[in-house]
């Protein structure tokens, strides 16, 4: 193994997340190879497949480093088993601190200097990076819910991993109309497109919220907003704040005796960052529209996919992420990327996106039972949900699998 100039071993990824600028693993001798074009290794059977990754390893969303760690653990496992059709995955992670300019610059470095075949990016700022990658015809997988990342006509080399953000709102809206058609609905979330997309999804399901309140990310005490919701008569609350604000708000609801029927945003319904800190008793009976397994949920203790993830993250990643919902999302994405690379013969560009779009009925270790990956609306592979309800111990099924592909067709 040789190490690229300026890079450090990948096992330091999480430990250096607060300040590291460039991380790598599974290096395989490309350090002096400056001849790579936008199509990377060009499919040569004796060259590695270069997968570049730009993630916020520092800054306000540094927790997303767990996503990168999960994907990296899957790639490393594949390398340990002989690679993709005998070719090693040379995966490299750059820190962008969730700065769109840095992410775009990282993409240039990964393509121009490292010859990346595929580039993975995190968040809505991926929309600022997509034009460059599409201009270079480099396959791009974005971890973002933004609808713009579903526009495969405008950005034909970009594919989104997470579901489109409007779909979750629509699934929640459908459930509300079924179980409480006369509900007075409120939405409390961050002042960005996350809340906007969820409100749009609710509207698509025929639900018009009586009250929508937004707060800046990082605001934790939302007691005044909860009192405003209660004052407006809101009896059904879609709670979509993120980070420490989610459990703090659930605790505050209990403290002030405000007990609406509560729907939690999927990414804010995990044990490690939300339910555990909130207190199980303060989440009991809440709903969430989910698609990934939570490795910290006791329901999945004996699940083969979760066990494989936890074994691989302990062997190849940071064992501290063994209970991380974000890490298993990255792990599942790593599996999807490898499946597309196997189909494309290790090629990036349109061979990769063509392979991605041909995926149909593929099992994945991270998603809920009864679901599979299939190319769907906007080129997204994840578009199925199941409504779950927290019983005080774990999340239990509270509805059938709902496919957002039916929204597009209906």
Image: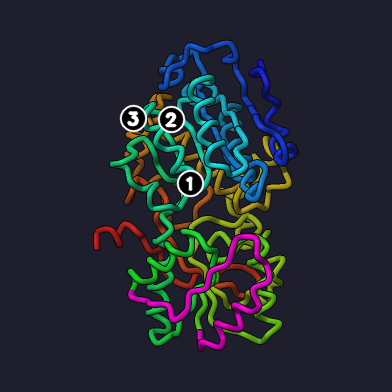
How crowded pointer 1 is (Cα within 10 Å; few <14, some 14-19, many 20+) is rated as many
Whether the residues at callouts 3 and 1 have beta carbons within 8 Å, the answer is no
**Residue 92 vertical placement versus 113 (above, below):** below
Q: Which stretch is magenta?
A: 206-234
Reading the chain from its start, which is encountered first: label 3 or label 1? 3
Q: Give me the residue at 60% from left, 17% from top.
A: 28
Rendering coords of residue 152 (x, y %): 32, 42
Q: Is residue 405 visible?
A: yes
Dot 2 or dot 3, earlier in sequence: 2
Q: Residue at x 54, y 77 (%)?
A: 262
Find the distance from the CA under tag 3 to the CA under tag 1.
Answer: 23 Å
> Which disc, if any, is residue 341?
2
Q: What is the spatial separation of the Cα atoms under label 2 and label 1, in whole angstroms?
A: 15 Å
What mark, if any, has residue 364 been given in the picture?
Answer: 1
Most foreground residue, 298 or 287: 287
Q: Is residue 115 above or below residue 357?
A: above
Q: Nearer the viewer, mark 2 or mark 1?
A: 2
- Quickly name the residue at label 3: 350
Q: Position of residue 132 (x, y in %)?
A: 42, 32
- In which image quadrant can residue 198 be found? bottom left
Which residue lies most toward the left here?
Answer: 410
| Residue 222 on image: x %, y % | 64, 73
Q: Residues within 10 Å of mark 3 (few under 14, many from 20)?
A: some
Relative to 4, say whether 178 is above or below.
Answer: below
> Circle 3 sits in a helix, a strand or a loop, which is it?
helix
Q: Viewer-nearest of labels 3 and 1?
A: 3
Decide: marks 2, 3 in contact (CB < 8 A)?
no
**Seen in the image, is 30 located left or right of residue 219?**
left
């Amino acid at each position: 193994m040789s190490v690229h100039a300026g890079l450090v071993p990948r096992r330091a990824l999480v430990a250096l997340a607060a300040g590291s600028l460039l991380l790598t693993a599974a290096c395989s001798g490309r350090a002096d190879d400056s001849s790579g074009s936008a199509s990377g290794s060009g499919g040569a059977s004796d060259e590695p497949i270069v997968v570049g990754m730009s993630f916020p390893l520092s800054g306000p969303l540094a927790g997303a480093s767990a996503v990168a760690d999960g994907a990296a653990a899957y790639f490393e496992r594949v390398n340990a088993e002989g690679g993709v059709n005998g070719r090693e995955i040379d995966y490299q992670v750059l820190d962008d601190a969730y700065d769109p300019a840095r992410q775009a610059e990282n993409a240039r470095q990964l393509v121009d200097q490292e010859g990346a075949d595929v580039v993975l990016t995190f968040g809505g700022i991926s929309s600022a990076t997509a034009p460059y990658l599409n201009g270079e015809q480099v396959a791009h997988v974005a971890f973002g819910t933004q609808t713009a990342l579903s526009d495969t006509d405008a950005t034909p080399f970009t594919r989104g991993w997470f579901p489109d953000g409007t779909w979750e709102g629509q699934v929640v809206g459908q459930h509300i109309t079924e179980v409480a058609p006369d509900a007075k609905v409120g939405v409390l979330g961050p002042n960005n497109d996350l809340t906007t997309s969820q409100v749009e999804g609710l509207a698509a399901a025929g639900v018009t919220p009586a009250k929508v309140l937004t707060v800046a990310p990082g605001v934790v005490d939302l007691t005044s907003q909860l009192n405003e919701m209660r004052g407006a008569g809101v009896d059904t609350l879609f709670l979509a704040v993120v980070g420490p604000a989610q459990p703090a708000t659930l605790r505050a609801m209990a403290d002030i005796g405000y007990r609406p029927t509560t729907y939690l945003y999927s990414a804010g319904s995990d044990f490690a960052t939300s339910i555990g800190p909130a207190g199980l008793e303060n989440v009991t009976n809440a709903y969430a529209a989910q698609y990934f397994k939570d490795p910290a949920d006791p329901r999945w203790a004996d699940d083969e996919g979760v066990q494989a993830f936890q074994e691989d993250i302990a062997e190849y990643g940071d064992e501290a992420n063994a209970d991380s919902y974000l890490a298993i999302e990255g792990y599942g994405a790593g599996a999807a990327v490898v499946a597309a690379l196997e189909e494309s013969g290790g090629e990036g560009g349109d061979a990769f996106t063509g392979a991605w779009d041909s995926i149909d009925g593929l099992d994945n270790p991270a998603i809920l039972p009864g679901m599979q990956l299939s190319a769907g609306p906007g080129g997204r592979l994840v578009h199925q949900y199941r409504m779950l309800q927290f019983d005080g111990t774990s999340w239990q099924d509270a509805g059938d699998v709902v496919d957002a592909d039916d929204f597009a067709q209906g």
